[in-house]
Each structure stands twice: as C-alpha cells, then as structure tokens.
Image: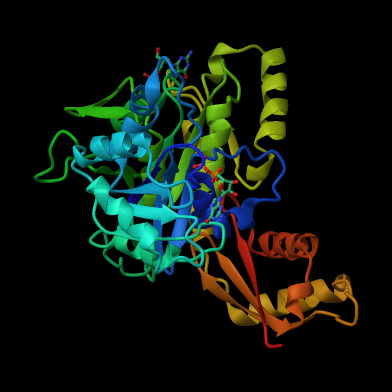
C-alpha cells in the first residue's frame, strides 16, 4: 500500500504550493490530455523510486461563526484519519497565530505522526525566527520553501520514514501470476452486484485465503483457467462469501486499490452518466499508469436513445482514456460478462507485453522514414534506437540526439505506431527520451 501524507494548516501558509511540488512530475505527464478533470486535493507523489499519495486539505475558509476548528473537523479530520503521516504547514513570515495553536492541539491528540514544516523560509535556514515554532509542541520546526523547492526532499524523507514498501520482486513471470484487479466506481454503480455475480458463477471458483478475516485484502479466484485476484475494493465489505456496499466512499482507499492493481475496472452507471466523481477516478487511473477497462453497467435500464447520448458523453468526458476498451454490461442480469473478462485479460496482457529492442528500434526507424520529427532551430532530433524501460504501463525509452526537441504530438504519433504494431489495448503507454547530447 502506498503511504498517505496529509498537508494540514491554515489558509495561505503554502499548502497547495507544497502539494504542487510533491505532485509536479506526475502532473506534467498527464497535463495535456483534453477532458481530464483533476482533483487538486489528491495527488500522486514520488520521492526517488518511492511513491506516495498526498492530500491537500486546503481551501477551507474559516468564518466567524463556524471557527477554524469546526471547519477543520469537517474538511480535515477524514484526511488526517486516513493519513500515515501529517505535515503541518506554518508560515515563518506571518509568524505563529492562534489558529496554528488550535490546529497543533488537534493534531497532538490525533495519534498520527506529525511533522512541522515552517514554510516560506527561503534564505532563513538558520533564522532565530524558527525557534518560536517549538511552542506548538509538535517537535522540531523543519524549514522549507515550497515556492523555491528547498528542504522538501528531506521533509518527505522524514515523513515516509518507517513506511517503506517491500520491494516486490519484479514481474519477470507476470504472465503466470494472478491478474490483480480493482473494481472502481462511485457508490451504487453496481460494484457489489457485479462482484457477487462473478463469485457466484459456477465456472468461477472462489476460495477464501486461509487465515484471512472478514476484511480480507483480496479474493483469489479462477475463470477459464486464468487466475485473478480481486483487490479489496473501496466501498465494499465482505460478509461471508458475499460483498455488500457500505455507505462511505473513500478516495484514499480507491487510490490505494488502484495503486495495488495491475488492471482497474472502472464502472459507470448508465442511468447516471459520467459524473465529476467518475472523471476524477478516471484521472487517478490514468496517472497511476494501470491498465483500465471501462464498463457501463445497468445497460439494461436505458433505451437506445439514452444509450447513444451516453456513449457520446463518455467519449467527450473520458477522452483521455481513449485507449481503454468500453464494454456494456448488466451485472444484475449477468449480461456482457464474457466480453468483459476478455477485455480485462487483454488489457493485462497488453500491460505486460514484452517489447524487444530490435522490434522497437525497427518501428521507430520506420516511423521516422514515414514522417521525420520537426527541426527546432538548429536541431533536428535523431532517433537511434529504443528499448523497453518497464511494464504496467509499458515504457519505451528512445535513445538518440537532440531528443529534448521532440514534440508531444510526435511522441503520440510514435506511440500510435507502437500500439498498432503490438495490438496494445487497455493500457496507457509512456515514451521517454534519452538524449546523448
Ligand atoms: P494554501 O492556502 O495554504 O494552500 O497556500 P498557497 O499554496 O495558496 O500559498 C499562499 C501564498 O503563499 C501564495 O501567494 C504563494 O505564492 C505563497 N507561498 C507559498 N510557498 C511559499 C514559499 O515557500 N515562499 C514564499 N515567499 N511564498 C510562498
Ligand atoms: P455498489 O454501491 O457499487 O456496490 O452498488 P450495488 O451493487 O449495491 O448496486 C446498487 C443498485 O443498483 C442496487 O439496487 C442494484 O440492484 C442495482 N444494480 C446493480 N447492477 C445493475 C444492473 O446491471 N442493472 C440494473 N437495472 N440495476 C443494477
């Protein structure tokens, strides 16, 4: 499970600036996809090879009558409860305030690991002003500058200390391993109906893992000789052999399930259309790099006109998941489940496809012959060879000269040709450029 860091503090201390810094590299990857709705409060962060989830609790404006503690209780309590570590952000230029004391008091009773980040401290690492913040009783004030990127790395290292993930042995024999599947979707979309339909099917052997409790992490099962592992899905509870829906929707649980999966099934409710929440979840999936299949559930419940409208709105709102196959199902009537299984298995196979250096190299040479990358000033990018840099998602690393000048449009052109050659479906792909000059 990815560790979760919550950023807490009164308005204007620089939480969202810090948030943007934690999530920046990821943002850059997906920034230019049309239609992607971003939820600026939840993001994926990375420190070296380590990944984490960061929550910005910012944006709340305390009013006279509610007071900051009430607002915090509403906006922040859940984030703190779900976090492994809390970064309490204060502002060295504004100095200590009564609100800071209130927040500190609340955090001290939370039982969470709390770090005290003193922001806007560019050029003030040794300043006596820092000492004032010991008063909060949170521990040593850590000077940072979110705007200038100072002190962030060591702050995050401290926050992540003790939450190291076990290095999972990398996916050499991934084809034989179970497909780790997460089912994502908002409440009432039909998650538990679908899962129970699956687990209830005759050909599908579900079994309990020895020694697991009611809150099992995952349910292994087989279908047509293919092993699956259903990851503990947000918003569901196991009751014996049956899943049932629970009221609360947790973004963090959804993010963790996505991070833990190889393939994510995104369920959309045909009777509701694509909501903002659906678009947010879709955005998380895209950022995660996981393979994805979109299933429109409750297809039985809408007429042909509504079906047309729905397909159009999905094309428009989830255009950034164009690579994901779209299947129509009725979990209730158990319709469309065959094609759904096939789509999931294909997406998994695509995500773990082995792309060899000679074939990739031939593909990029052919692509260049067909259409050369644009010259930029004195530079003409030269693509020499390519190798596979990773799986799930497939990463293609292209080596050559002046590659910094290759446009995003051209990268997408290359991606299209590689996809077409290998028949990749249901997985995002990344192209990285390594210039030797
Ligand atoms: P939030 O309300 O806590 O999310 O705060 P913001 O991230 O919106 O920042 C509030 C203001 O502080 C903005 O004008 C930022 O540009 C500024 N700010 C944020 N971080 C720093 C910093 O490290 N140094 C300085 N000097 N200003 C900063
Ligand atoms: P969850 O909150 O995502 O687990 O959703 P549930 O599985 O509890 O389903 C919510 C409601 O939608 C229930 O009343 C289901 O009977 C209904 N439902 C689920 N799948 C379908 C379907 O394919 N067609 C129709 N018409 N209703 C469905």
Between 242 and 393, the one lying in front of the other is: 393
Q: In terms of image quadrants, where is residue 6?
A: top left
Residue 231 is left or right of residue 209, and the answer is right
Seen as rendered, the residue at the extreme front is: 128
Check the image and name the residue furthest to the bottom. 437
Residue at 69% of width from left, 47% of height from top?
33
| Residue 110 higher or lower than 304, as above or below | below
Residue 232 visible in this rendered orientation of the protein: no
Q: Is residue 276 left or right of residue 334?
A: right
Which residue is at a point 15% across and 33% down the rendered structure image? 214
Applied colour scheme: rainbow
Q: Position of residue 426 (x, y in %)?
A: 57, 49
Q: Nearer the viewer, residue 97 or 102?
A: 97
- Give me the residue at 20% from left, 29% from top: 241
> Closest to the observer: 55 or 190?
55
Residue 211 is left or right of residue 327, and the answer is left
Q: Is residue 344 above or below residue 139?
A: above
Ligand 2: quadrant of the figure = top left
Residue 203 drawn at (x, y percent) = 31, 36
> Which residue is found at the position 70% from the left and 59% from the top?
420
In the shown orientation, is residue 138 left or right of residue 426? left
Q: Image quarter for residue 369?
A: bottom right
Q: Residue furthest left?
A: 211
Residue 108, position in %: x, y?
Answer: 21, 41
Q: Is residue 23 visible?
A: yes
| Spot occupied by residue 405 in the image (x, y as percentages of width and height) | 79, 73
Looking at the rendered structure, the number of numbered marks drawn on it comes to 0
**Quadrant of the image containing the C terminus:** bottom right
């Amino acid at each position: 499970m990815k560790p979760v860091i919550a950023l807490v503090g009164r308005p204007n201390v620089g939480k969202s600036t810090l948030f943007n810094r934690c999530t920046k590299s990821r943002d850059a990857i997906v920034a230019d996809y049309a239609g992607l709705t971003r939820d600026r409060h939840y993001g994926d962060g990375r420190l070296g090879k380590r990944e984490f989830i960061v929550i910005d609790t910012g944006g709340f404006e305390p009013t006279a009558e509610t007071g900051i503690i009430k607002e915090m209780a509403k906006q922040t309590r859940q984030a703190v409860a779900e976090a492994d570590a809390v970064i309490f952000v204060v502002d060295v230029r504004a100095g200590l305030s009564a609100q800071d004391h209130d927040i500190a008091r609340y955090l001290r009773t939370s039982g969470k690991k709390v770090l005290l980040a003193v922001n806007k401290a560019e050029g003030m690492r040794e300043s006596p002003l820092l000492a004032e913040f010991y008063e909060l009783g949170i521990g040593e004030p850590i000077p940072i500058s979110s705007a200038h990127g100072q002190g962030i790395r060591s702050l995050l290292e401290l926050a992540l200390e003790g939450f190291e993930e076990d290095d999972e042995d990398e996916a050499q024999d991934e084809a034989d391993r179970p497909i780790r599947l997460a089912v994502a979707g908002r409440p009432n979309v039909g998650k538990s109906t679908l899962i129970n339909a699956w687990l209830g099917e005759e050909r599908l052997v579900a079994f309990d893992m020895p020694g697991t409790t009611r809150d099992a992490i995952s349910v292994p099962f087989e279908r047509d000789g293919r092993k699956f592992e259903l990851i503990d899905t947000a918003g569901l509870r196991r009751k014996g052999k049956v899943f049932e829906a629970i009221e609360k929707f947790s973004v963090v649980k959804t993010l963790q399930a996505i991070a833990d999966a190889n393939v994510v099934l995104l369920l959309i409710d045909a009777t509701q259309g694509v909501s903002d929440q659906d678009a947010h979840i879709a955005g998380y999936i895209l950022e995660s790099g996981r393979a994805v299949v979109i299933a429109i559930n409750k297809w039985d419940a809408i007429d042909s006109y509504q079906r047309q409208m729905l397909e159009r709105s999905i094309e428009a709102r989830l255009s950034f998941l164009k690579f994901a196959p779209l299947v129509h199902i009725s979990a209730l009537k158990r319709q469309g489940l065959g094609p759904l299984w096939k789509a999931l298995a294909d997406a998994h196979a695509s995500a773990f496809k082995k792309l060899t250096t000679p074939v990739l190299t031939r593909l990029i040479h052919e692509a260049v012959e067909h259409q050369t990358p644009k010259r930029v000033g004195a530079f003409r990018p030269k693509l020499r060879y390519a190798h596979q840099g990773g799986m799930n998602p497939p990463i293609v690393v292209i080596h050559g000269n002046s590659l910094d000048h290759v446009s995003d449009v051209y990268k997408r052109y290359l991606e299209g040709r590689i996809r077409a050659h290998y028949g990749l479906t249901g997985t995002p792909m990344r192209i990285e450029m390594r210039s030797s000059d």
